[in-house]
Amino acid sequence: MNLPLIIRAEEHSEKIAIATTDGSFTYRDLLHTSSQIATNLLQNSEDLQEERVAFLIAPGFEYVATQWGIWRAGGMAVPLCVSHPRPELEYVITNSGASIIVAHPNFEGILRSLAEEYNLRFILTSETLPSNIARLPEVDITRRALILYTSGTTGKPKGVVTTHQNIQAQVTSLITAWEWTSNDFPGETRRERILHILPLHHIHGIINVLTCALWAGAECHILSKFDAETVWRRICDGDLTLFMAVPTIYVKLITAWENASRERQKTMSEGCGKMRLMVSGSAALPVQVLEKWQSISGHFLLERYGMTEIGMALSNPLHGERLAGYVGKPLPEVEVRLVNENGELVPVGTPGEIQVKGPGVFLEYWQNPEATAKAFQDGWFCTGDTAVVENGKYRILGRMSVDIIKTGGYKVSALEIEEVLRSHPDIQECAVVGVADIEWGERVCAALVLQGLQPLTLESFRSWAKERLAVYKVPTQILIVEELPRNAMGKVTKPTVVELFC
C-alpha cells in the first residue's frame, strides 16, 4: 500500500505539480523521479526502515523529488538549510544520526568533507539515476517521516519528529479550513496555484504550502530564493490563487510597491485582487503592516498560529470576520486550551499558556525522551506561548520565556547564541535578547562584556559569528558594557538588557 500522498498524486498524473524557472513538472514526473531516487537510496536493501537521510537542495523540483524519494524508500527526511554554516549543518547531521547525505553539486564543497569525516554515504543530485525501478516498500502512515530542528529554551535545537500520519492530519486540517481544491475554478481556466517563496527546512514552507498544494492536486510555483521584484512579477501575471508569507516578506513587498510607478502599482494591486487567499504566519503581524497591505492588495491577511511541534492550531476564518491581532479559533481536528501555571483551565478573558491536542501533534523530540515528556501535560502539548480568548477569538500575548526570540519568522534560542558567543576570544560575558522591530518582529541583539582592551566592531563580530551560526541568529546590533544588569540572585535581567537597546 502506497502512502496516501502518493496515491493522490497518481490521480493527478498529467497535471502540473511543480513549476520553477527550469520548467514545469507534472505529478507523473514527480512520481517517476521520486521512484528513481528511492531506488537509488535503497541500493540493495528492501526498506530504509526509518534511516535518516539528510539533504541539502535549493527549493525546486529536485528538492521535492528527493523528499518524496526518501519517504517512498521508507526513510526519514532531514532537510538541511541552504544558508546554514558548516557547524549548524554538522549538528543536524550528527544529532539526527543520518546515514546518507544527498546534496546538490553547489553544496558538495561543504558536505562531502562532513560525509567523509563521519563515514556517511554521499549522493549528488547530478548523478545518473537508475532506469530500472526497484520494488518499493510498503510504508505505513504511522512511521516516522520527518525531522525538523527547532530552537527551545535549553540551548541547542531539538529534532521534532513527525509521522506520515501527523503530516496527513496537519495537511487535511488546513485543506478543509482554507478550502484548497484540485478542480478548475467555475467559469475560469485557472487551477489552484500557489507561489512558494519560503524556506524548505521549516514547517511553514514544507507543510502549509508545498505538501498542502501537492495533496490537493494543485500547482506549486517555487522560487529558489525570495526576491521582491520577482514575486511582484509573478503576482502581476494574475494566475495565482493563494499566497503565504511571513510578516518580514510583506514588509519587503510593501517597500517594493511604494518604490514602483503609479501605473505599475495599479498592476501589482490588480494581481493581488485575483487571488482568493493571502496568509501571514510564523510571527506576529504588526497592525500597521496588515493595514498597509490591505490598502495595497485589498486583502485582509488571514493570520494563523502554529509551530513545528503541532502544525497549525488556530486560524482566522476563510469566510467571515478577521480581527487584527487575533489568530481566530481552533482548526478542524485540533483541540486548544489555556491553563495557568498550575495547569488549571483559566476563565475566558484571563491569559494562559496555550496547550494543544490532536492528530497533527508531533511524535517526539528525536532521541530526547526527557524533553518529550516535559513538553506534555496529561496528553496536551505545552507550547510555551501565552494567549487570551476575547470575543471567542484567541489573541497571542507572546512567549513565556524571554530566551526565545522570533525574528523574520524563525524561532531562535538566546541561550544557544550566547553559548557560541562565549567562545569568541574577546568576549567574557554576554546576554542576547530580542528587541521589537517592525520589519523582523524582533531583532537579535547582544550586550557584551569584553576581556582585555581589544576593540570589537560590529562588522568583525558578525563576520566571525556567521561562520558559526545561521545568519538569522547573528546579532544585528551589539552593545559593549562594563557589566551585565543582574538581580539579587546574580541572574542577568533580560528585560533590563532590552531597555539598553531602546
Image: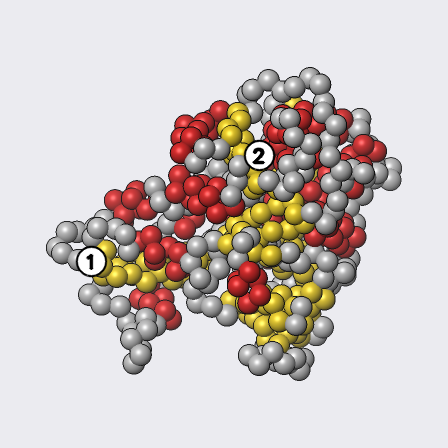
The correct choice, above or below, for 68 with respect to 299 in the image is above
Q: Amino acid at mark 1?
A: Leu
Residue at 61 percent across and 29 percent down: it is: 41
User: Could you tell me if residue 303 is visible in this image?
Assistant: no
Left or right: where does residue 55 sit relative to residue 318? left
The extreme right residue here reads: 187
Q: How many marks?
A: 2
Residue at 26 percent across and 68 percent down: it is: 484
Q: Which mark is residue 430?
A: none
Q: How is the image coloured?
A: secondary structure
Locate residue 353: give its quadrant: bottom right
Residue at 43 percent across and 64 percent down: it is: 403
Locate residue 471: give its quadrant: top left
Helix, strand, or loop for circle 2? loop
The residue nearer to you, when weighing 364 against 277, is 364
On the image, the x and y values in percent for residue 29 come to 72, 25
User: Could you tell me if residue 201 is visible in this image?
Assistant: yes
Helix, strand, or loop for circle 1? strand
Q: Which mark is residue 59?
A: 2
Residue at 32 percent across and 62 percent down: it is: 431
Q: Which mark is residue 450?
A: 1
Image quarter of the N terminus: top right
On the image, the x and y values in percent for residue 112 come to 44, 29
Q: Amino acid at mark 2?
A: Pro
The residue nearer to you, when weighing 406 against 201, is 201
Q: Residues within 10 Å of mark 1 (few under 14, many from 20)?
A: many
The residue nearer to you, when weighing 436 against 348, is 348
On the image, the x and y values in percent for residue 56 come to 52, 34
On the image, the x and y values in percent for residue 336 come to 69, 68
The correct choice, above or below, for 347 with respect to 126 in the image is below
